[in-house]
């Protein structure tokens, strides 16, 4: 199957961002603990979202399951963006808005992949991936 460079870049961006943040979630880094404590879902929300992000990253890398991975990433980043906008603020613990920007870039890249994989949506609805 032919994959264009833009699709590979979008996949790379999502996977690098999600896998990079996993270290902070799974190691209970101060910023991650602060975020999920503020949201009232520490530690289960932190660990659970990390697991979902790991699964999304793996699924995005497998051509047959890219759509499912992108949908998972989109959902997770929707939660992250809404958490920033409603509870945390754009800037968290002096990060200059970096976490919000990373969530937004991942959200946009996921939307791109979903758009590129849109022809598979009917099969997904029939569970025929």
Image (tube, rainbow, N blue to C red):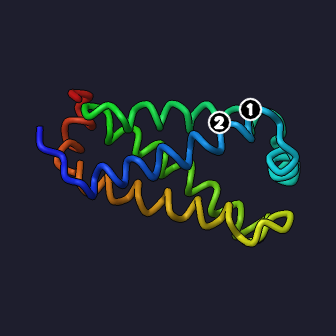
Q: Position of residue 127 (x, y in %)?
A: 26, 28
Task: Identify the disc placed on residue 108.
Answer: none
Q: Is residue 103 above or below residue 60?
A: below
Mark 2, Cα crowd under 10 Å, few <14 / some 14-19 / many 20+, is many
Depth check: 48 or 104 in front? 104
The residue at which mark 2 appears reads as 50
> What residue is drawn where x is 70% and y is 60%?
83
Q: Position of residue 48 (x, y in %)?
A: 67, 33
Q: Which residue is at the far top?
A: 128
Picture quadrant of residue 49: top right
Q: Is residue 56 above or below residue 79?
A: above
Q: Nearer the viewer, mark 1 or mark 2?
A: 1
Say left or right for 82 vs 35: left
Are the residues tagged 1 and 2 within 8 Å (C-beta)? yes
Quadrant showing the C terminus? top left
Mark 1 and mark 2: Cα distance apart in space: 7 Å
> What residue is drawn where x is 74% and y is 32%?
26
Quadrant showing the N terminus? top left
Say left or right for 127 vs 23: left
Mark 1 residue element: helix
Mark 2 residue element: helix
Depth check: 88 or 18 in front? 18
Say left or right for 32 vs 17: right
Q: Position of residue 46 (x, y in %)?
A: 74, 39
């Amino acid at each position: 199957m032919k994959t264009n460079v833009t699709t590979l870049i979008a996949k790379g961006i999502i996977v690098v961002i999600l896998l990079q943040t996993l270290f902070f979630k799974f190691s209970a880094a101060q910023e991650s603990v602060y975020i999920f404590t503020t949201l009232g879902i520490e530690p289960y929300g932190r660990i659970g979202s990390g697991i979902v992000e790991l699964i999304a990253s793996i699924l995005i890398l497998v051509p047959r399951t890219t759509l499912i991975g992108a949908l998972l990433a989109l959902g997770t980043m929707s939660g992250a963006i809404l958490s920033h906008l409603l509870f945390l603020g754009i800037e968290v613990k002096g990060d200059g808005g970096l976490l919000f920007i990373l969530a937004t870039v991942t959200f946009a890249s996921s939307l791109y992949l979903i758009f590129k994989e849109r022809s598979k949506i009917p099969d997904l609805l029939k569970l025929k991936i």
